[in-house]
Amino acid sequence: MLHVGLVHETKFRKGCVVGRVVMRRDVALKWDGWESVATRWLEQQPAEVDLLETVEAYVAKIAAFQTWYTDEREKVDWRELRYAEQLRRAVLALRGQDELPQVSESHAYGIHQS
């Protein structure tokens, strides 16, 4: 159904061919298959929705979210690593050791060779 409300426009601007694809809001709203959030979004849009502008705005929001998420995840990772180091030192202190014994990677991951 989406293609029914789409219009490709080509214009000449300053000696260049400029094309865009727009979705006609009112035509698109006639389709009854939209999720409620999509319907509400469409109802708030202008009569002609420029799809390139819409996609670019969406991509910018996703990029901003990804940057925020990565920054927040790093903070959490560093807090967890600091906490793990505090626990390691506490275990060492309880055992009266300077360092925990080394464990092979295969043993640490439960991989036992016969």
Image: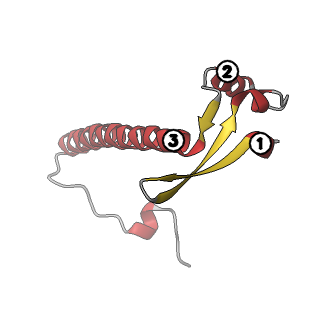
Name the residue that disc number 2 marks: 43
Crowding around mark 1 (Cα neighbors within 10 Å: few <14, some 14 to 19, many 20+) is few
Relative image position of residue 64 (x, y in whole percent): 39, 39
Query: Judging from the image, what secondary structure is the residue with disc 2 in?
Result: helix
Name the residue that disc number 3 marks: 53
Question: Marks 3/2: CA distance?
Answer: 17 Å
Question: Marks 3/1: CA distance?
Answer: 17 Å
Relative image position of residue 65 (x, y in whole percent): 42, 38
Taking the image as shown, residue 113 lies to the left or right of residue 3, namely left
Q: Nearer the viewer, residue 100 or 19?
A: 19
Disc 3 and disc 2 in contact, CB within 8 angstroms: no
Query: Judging from the image, what secondary structure is the residue with disc 1 in?
Result: helix
Q: Residue at x 64, y 41 (%)?
A: 22
The image shows residue 45, relative to residue 59, as above or below, that is: above
Residue farthest along the bottom direction in this orientation = 114
Q: Amino acid at mark 2?
A: Glu
* Mark nearer the N terminus (3 vs 2): 2
Q: Amino acid at mark 3?
A: Glu
Crowding around mark 3 (Cα neighbors within 10 Å: few <14, some 14 to 19, many 20+) is few
Crowding around mark 2 (Cα neighbors within 10 Å: few <14, some 14 to 19, many 20+) is some
The image shows residue 101, relative to residue 75, as above or below, that is: below
Query: Judging from the image, what secondary structure is the residue with disc 3 in?
Result: helix
Q: Report the quarter where the C terminus lies.
A: bottom right
Relative image position of residue 73 (x, y in whole percent): 36, 41
Question: How are the residues colored?
Answer: secondary structure
Q: Residue at x 85, y 28 (%)?
A: 32
Q: Amino acid at mark 1?
A: Leu
Relative image position of residue 25 (x, y in whole percent): 70, 29
Name the residue that disc number 1 marks: 2
